[in-house]
Image (cartoon, grey):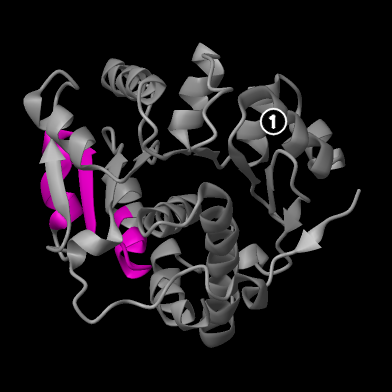
Amino acid sequence: MTLQALAFSDMKGWLKPRANDANKGSFGHVLIIGGDYGMPGSVRLAAEAALRVGAGLVTVVTRPEHVGAVVSGRPELLCYGLNSPEENAFRTCLARATIILLGPGLGGSDWSESLYDAIHEQSSASTTPLLIDADGLNWLTKKQADWQSRAHCVFTPHPGEAARLLNTSIVNIQANRAQAIQSLQARFGGVFVLKGSGSLVYTNHKIPRICHAGNPGMASAGMGDVLSGVIAGLMAQGLTPWHATQMGVLLHAEAGDATLKKQGGPGLLASDLIPAIHSLMDQC
């Protein structure tokens, strides 16, 4: 099967130069939903990554107990602690969002399920782009609801999540990753990333893209949260899901390589990549 390598040279012009009279409203509003008990760091990582690639505004919806942890040290973030999607503040957040990211640290509780169900219902009546990651994908596995017609959706599973989505084994996913990502896209529609060594990006009727950057040092907690935040931040600025996903995957992987070269050895943290991602935006 033909695969096309991701390259920054192919992405020139995707992000337009900023006008002198631009304001924060010119570059979109990312809404990130997640951070169940014990996992406020997931939404914080995704949110900061979205800001660092240029999103104008980023709002986090999380557990009320986690608001302080999310905004501490990053006061540029907006954050709402909500117990239920029935609260008026949640509907206000949805109305303002340019792109919704569902899943970082979302968890498997009743609270988590209520937020997943609310976004599924909202998405059926809206064309607001949506990225589903992490526990959002686990809820998708449990619910198996129809997302097929929603071309504005991006899904970012690692091999374990992909195996659950297709009701197969990780061994089978890894044995033919190109076939696996095509099967995922055929089942759920939208744009897919199959993460891992040689991450793949695919949507229907396109040549699958492969990312040759990245390294084993990136096998640590929170890396996927940063990636989803990067993609969401790019979508907020008007990139299509297809273009934003390609650029986000490459930025994330190249940042991992640049950071490993600078710092060396194991112990690479997801948050270590964010300054490098910011610097690499000059290549886009």
In the image, farthest residue toward the bottom: 262
* Dot 1 crowding, Cα within 10 Å, few <14, some 14–19, many 20+: many
Q: Label 1 is placed on what type of residue?
A: Leu
Q: Nearer the viewer, residue 262 or 200?
A: 200
- Residue 271 vs residue 190: left or right? left
Is 210 placed left or right of 261 in the picture?
A: right
Specify start and end residues of the magenta stretch as a single range.
47-71
x 40%, y 56%: residue:
238
268 is higher (above) or lower (below) than 220: below
The quarter of the picture where residue 175 lies is top right
267 left or right of 46 in image: right
Camera-nearest residue between 19 and 254: 19
Q: Which residue is mark 1?
A: 184
Q: Quadrant of residue 4?
A: bottom right
Q: Residue at x 75, y 22 (%)?
A: 168
Please state if 18 lies on the left or on the right of 209 as rendered.
left
| Residue 169 placement (x, y as % from top left) | 76, 27
Q: Residue at x 73, y 56 (%)?
A: 209
Instruction: Judge whether 191 appears above or below 137 on screen.
Output: below
